[in-house]
Image: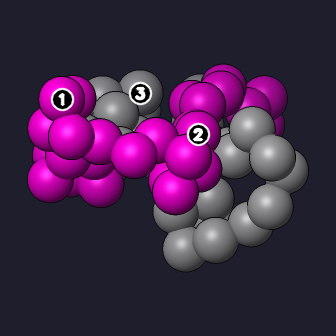
Amino acid sequence: MTYRITRFDGDEDDITSQDFDNYDDAYNLLEEVYSDMCCSDADYEDRPYYEIIQVDN
């Protein structure tokens, strides 16, 4: 099973070009990307929304 991160707006970037062997690896990457944001001062409109999907081989 392979997992991929996609953007809600359909654009591609360095994150969406990667494939992951498991869900946890994809989740950990997104956690790193968003770890510098604090919920109280975050401007979410400046960052794309991502989703982890399962890709059938």
Measure how far apart labels 2 and 1 are at the Cα level: 18 Å
Measure how far apart labels 3 and 1 are at the Cα level: 28 Å
Q: Residue at 39% across / 46% down in the picture?
A: 43
Question: Mark 2 or 1 closer to N-term?
Answer: 1
Residue highlighted by disc 1: 40
SS label for mark 1: loop
Say whether residue 43 is magenta: yes
Q: Nearer the viewer, residue 50 or 18?
A: 50
The amino acid type of the residue labelled 2 equals Tyr
**Closer to us: mark 2 or mark 1?**
1
Q: What stretch is highlighted in magenta?
A: 32-57
Q: In this view, does 47 lie to the left or right of 32?
A: right
Q: Residue at 14% across / 53% down in the picture?
A: 36
Q: Residue furthest bottom?
A: 14
**Closer to us: mark 3 or mark 1?**
1
Give me the disc on residue 49.
2
Give how far across and how far down residue 56 sits, in percent. 78, 29
Give me the disc on residue 23.
3
Question: Mark 2 or 3 closer to N-term?
Answer: 3
Image quarter in which the C terminus is found: top right
Give the quarter of the image for residue 38: top left
